Image (tube, rainbow, N blue to C red):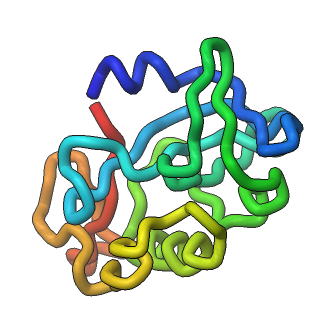
Amino acid sequence: MSRMKRQLIGKDVYDIDHEKVGTISELYIDEKVNPERPTWVSIKTGLMGIKENLVPISLTVPQENEVIVETKKEIITESPDITSGEEISSNVEQRLYEYYANVPGALSTVLAENITATNFVDDKSANAVSDNDTGDYAMYKSK
């Protein structure tokens, strides 16, 4: 995991037309999908990189000095944004899955058909946070 993180964090991100989108800031794991590999890549976008958007890692193509995301910049920047540095609640995660379900190649058939709001991580991991302290745990940052 740490090798992948080192290879991606801080890399500039470009869309399919090679328009700069932002910079990778974090990787997120969804244990229900794969506890060993990140499911999402967080990209700092917008002026001064103050907005943060998640992209399914399946859309990323790491290059030597950059990462290409196989979709248009607008798809990325119009996705549900997150608060920088925070864990992802199951409500936000569900919105992300719904949003990217319509983007070709973003989610595998298994994810698009089988991920629902009720089957996200529900155990209290040291890295998970609650959605309004309801015990509604979702994704957490990779280590």
Whole-percent x, y for residue 49 in the image: 76, 36
Viewed as shown, does residue 63 lie left or right of 136?
Answer: right
Q: Quadrant of residue 74?
A: bottom right
| Residue 66 sits above or below residue 122 on the image | above
Which quarter of the rendered picture does the N terminus lie within?
top left
Q: Is residue 5 above or below residue 102?
A: above
Quadrant containing the C terminus in the rendered view: top left
Residue 105: percent from left, percent from top: 57, 62
Q: Quadrant of residue 23?
A: top right
Identity of the residue drawn at 78% across and 44% down: 16
Front in this rendered view, residue 3 or 70: 70
Residue 124 at x, y percent in the picture: 13, 61
Tell me what residue is drawn at x 52 percent, y 24 percent. 9
Q: Residue at x 26, y 80 (%)?
A: 134
* Image height of 63 relative to 78, above or below: above
Report the number of discs: 0
- Is 31 situated left or right of 55 in this image? left
Pinpoint residue 139: horizontal percent, then vertical percent.
33, 58
